[in-house]
Amino acid sequence: RRVHGAHFRRGDFNKMSSVFEKVVAAPPIEVFALTERFVKDTDANKVNLGVGAYRTEEGKPWVLPVVRKVEKDLAADESLNKEYIPVCGLASFCEAATRLLLGANDKGVSDGRVSSVQALGGTGAVYLALQFLRIHLGKSNLYVSRPTWGNHKSIGKLAQYTSINEYRYWDAAKRCVDMAGMLEDLKAAPCGSVILLHAVAHNPTGMDLSAEQWDKVIAVLKERNHFPVMDIAYQGFASGDLERDALAVRKVYQSGFEMFICQSFSKNFGLYNERVGNLVMVTNSAEVTARLKTQMTMLVRTTWSNPPSQGCRIVSRVLNDTQLFDQWRGNVKTMAERIQLMRKLLFDELKTLATPGTWNHIIEQIGMFCYTGLSPTQCKSLIDDDHIYLLMEGRINMCGINRNNVKYVAKAMDRVVRNVK
Amino acid sequence: AEYMGSMKVLPFAVSRFAAPMSFWSHVEMAPLDPIVGLNELFSKDSNPKKTNLGVGAYRDENGKPWVLPSVKKAEKRVMDANYDKEYVGIVGDLQFTKLSAQLALTSESPALTQGRTTTVQTISGTGALRVAGNFLAKFHNKPLWMPAPTWGNHTPIFAHAGLQLKSYRYYDAKTIGLDIEGMLDAISKIPEGDTILFHPSAHNPTGVDPSQSQWDQIEKVVAQRKLLPLFDMAYQGFASGDLDRDAYAVRHFIKQGHQCILTQSYAKNMGLYGLRVGAMSVVCDSGEEAKKVESQVKIVIRPMYSSPPIYGVRIAKTILGDKDGLYKEWVDDVKTMSGRIIKMRHEMVDQLAKEGSTHNWDHIKKQIGMFCFTGLKEEQVMKLRTDYSIYMTSNGRISVAGLNEKNLSYVASAIHNVSK
C-alpha cells in the first residue's frame, strides 16, 4: 500500500488490495431482514407477525408497568452507581432467578449443587452452556429439535460443535409432536450427546410435550447418558402461570440429571434490549459446582467480562419484593391472556371462513408462536400480496394479531390455503 | 493456540466420595483472577489505613466511585423519554455507533465520509475485542502481535477467539519506559500481513505511551510490513484530558491509508463501567466492502448474545449527540478525572522526594492514564501488602485513581520504606 519514502493519500490509488477482499456478503438473518422489509412497507394493512416481541392490542410494544416503575426508582436511587457488577452477575438476581425456576425451597440450591451465572439474555446463556460443554467435557455432538429456534444451530456452530443434528419433533402432517420419531432419534444419538430441549412454549411450533411424554424423554436421556440443556424463554409468558410453565424443567431436574438450564427474561419481563438471562448449572455435588463456577467465570471474562447491570437490577428488585412480584405476575398474565384470546379469535375466524384443513393446533399450541403449517410459497404470497410478514417456515407471532387485523389475517390465510400451493 | 492453561480437559477421575459420579470430576479449580483476589484480601483487611491501588476504576478525592454529572443529566433525559425496551438489532443503536465512530475519528475523516467504515455496538471494550477476534479468526487468520506486557485479559480473549498470539517488545524495565528501538526492530521483523495490536493511549498496565513522533515512526514500519493494525482504545480523553490528543495514533494511521480495526470502551471516560458501552469499527476499502464485513460481523454477534444492551448506550448517545450542551459538560468531567489523576502523579513524585527517596521516580509523572508501573519488585509489593495494607498487583502496577490527598503521604512513605 505504501511505497517506502513516498507519501500517498487514499485517492491516489485506483484499486488497492484490501485485507478483506475475500469477505463475501453473509446471507441476511431472516427474522431481521423481515422486520426491515416490514418497516419500509407503506401499505396501510401491513401486519408484522415476524419478530418475537409482545405487542399490545394497539400493536404497540409494551413496557411492563412494574418495570417502568422500578426503572425510575433505580435512576433516583442515590445509593446505586455504575460500577462493574461481578463477572458471574448480580448475586441477588441469580439467586432470585434460580428460585423462580426451581422453586423457593429447592434442596439442590440450598445444598450448593445448583448455582448460576448471569448471561446476556437467553442467547448468551445457551452460548456459555454449549461452549462450556465443548471445552470442559469435550462434547462435540449437539442435538436440536426439528424445527427449532433459528439461532440454536448458529450458537452450536459458534461454539464449534463438529456435529449438529436434529431430533424429530414437529409432525407436519398431523400438526402435533412426533413422539415416536423424537424418541427414536434420541435413542440413536451417540451416548453422551448434548440435547437442547425447549422447556415450554416451543419455538417455533408452540407445541409442548405432555407430562407423560416428558417421562418418556427422560427415560431415553438416562439410558443414553445424554447431557440435557433446557432453554426456558417463556416462563409465565406461556400459560400466565409461572409454576405451570416451569413444570417440565422441574421434572427433568428432579430426575437427577447433571444439566444446564438457560433462562431468558426478555419476554416475561419485556426486557428485550437489556439482555437479561441466567445460566443455571446443576451437578451432583456442591464442590463440583463451585469448581464449575470458577471455570465459567473465565469463559465469561473472555466473552463480555461482566454482564450489564441495568436489567438484572430491575428483575432482582421485582423478584425480591412481594408487592412488586405480585404486580409483575399480573403483568405477565395480561400478556399471556391476550395471546390466548388472539389464538381463539384467529381459530374462530378460520372456522367461520371454513378454511380447508385442520386448525386446532392454533389453540392447542402455547406461547408467542404458532406454526401455521403453511408452505413457503404460501408464506411468500402472504408477504408479497397481503403485506403480512411471517417466517417462511410458517411461524407467526400471535402478538402481532389484534382485533383490528385478525379478520384480515384470517382472510389472507384462507386465500393462500385455497389458491396457493 | 498457545494459551490453554486450565482449559485442558484432564483425564476423567472418579470422585472418591460416595456421591454419584459426576461428569465434571476432572474439572480443575480455575486460578483466581489476580484483581478479584486482591479485592477480597483488601476487604478482609482490618487495618484502618488500608489502601486499594488494584482496581481499575476511577475514584474521586474521597476514594469513592464517581457518577459523572453529565451522565446523571443524560440519564434523567433518558428516563423522561420513556423509551421502549424493544430489541435494538444485532449491531446495536445506529445513532450511537455513528457518534462513537465520529468521536474516535472525527466526522471529517474520509474513512467515515466515504462510508467505508462499519461500526457496531458491543459489550464494552471486552465485547468489542472478542467480536473482532472471532471475525479475524474467520477472515484474516494470521498471528496477532501484542505489546509486552499487555492487559491481562487480551490473551484469553483472543485465544478463545481462535487466534495465534505473539508479542513484540514494548516496555523496558530498565528505563521504566518505552523500548522504542526494540519495538521498531521487533515490528520490522513481523511477517507481512499479520495483525498487530496497539494501545493508542494510556497503555495498560504500564501507562507508558509512545509520543506522537514515535507513533509516526511506528506507522512507517507497520506500513512497510503491510500489517493490519488493531487499536484498543479504552481511555480516549481519560488519558491526557484531551479527546483529540488521545486519538492521535488511530487518526494518523487512518490518514496514512491503513485499514484499521478499532475497539472503543466508554467504561472509563464516561464512567459507564457496568452498563457495558462499547463499539467496534472496521475501516474498509469501500462502502460495499464495509457492508459485506458488517454482514459477517453480525454472524459472529447473533449466536454469541443476539444483540447488545441499550441502557448505557442511550446515556452515551444523549451526551455525544448534544454537542452544545451535555457534550461540553462531559468534556469537563473527563478533564476533572484525568486532571485529578495527573495531579496525584505529580504529588506522589514530590512526596517521595520529601520522604528522602533517592530513586528517580519521574516515570510516575511521565506515564499516563489510570495505571502506573511503579518499578517496584514483587517482594516489595508483598511487603507493602503485609506491612502497610497497601494493595497493588504483583507486577508493581498501581491504579493512580486510588490515590487521594488523604492517603498520598501514607503510600509515599510506605513505598519509600520498602525501596530505600
Image (cartoon, helix red, strand yellow):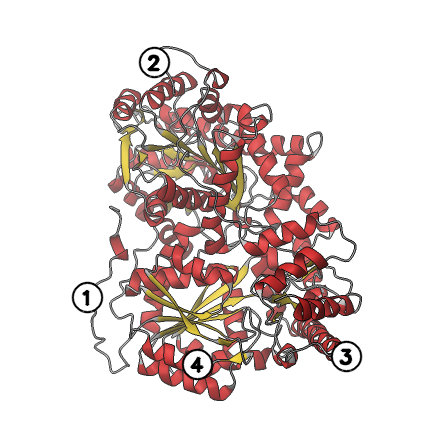
Q: Which residue is disc 2 drawn over?
A: A4
Q: Are marks 1 and 2 on the same chain?
A: no
Q: Which residue is disc 3 drawn over?
A: A352
Q: Which residue is disc 1 drawn over?
A: B11
- Distance between the alpha carbons at the discs numbered 2 and 4: 67 Å
Q: Are marks 2 and 4 on the same chain?
A: yes
Q: Are marks 3 and 2 on the same chain?
A: yes
- Distance between the alpha carbons at the discs numbered 3 and 2: 79 Å
User: SS class of the residue under badge 4?
Assistant: helix
Residue closer to the observer: A178 or B405: A178
User: SS class of the residue under badge 3?
Assistant: helix
Q: Are marks 3 and 4 in contact (CB under 8 Å)?
A: no
Q: Residues within 10 Å of mark 3 (few under 14, many from 20)?
A: few
- Distance between the alpha carbons at the discs numbered 1 and 2: 54 Å
Q: Earlier in the sequence, mark 3 or mark 4?
A: 4
Q: Nearer the viewer, mark 1 or mark 3?
A: 3
Q: Which residue is disc 4 drawn over?
A: A252
Q: Nearer the viewer, mark 1 or mark 2?
A: 2
Q: Nearer the viewer, mark 3 or mark 4?
A: 3
Q: Amino acid at mark 3?
A: Thr
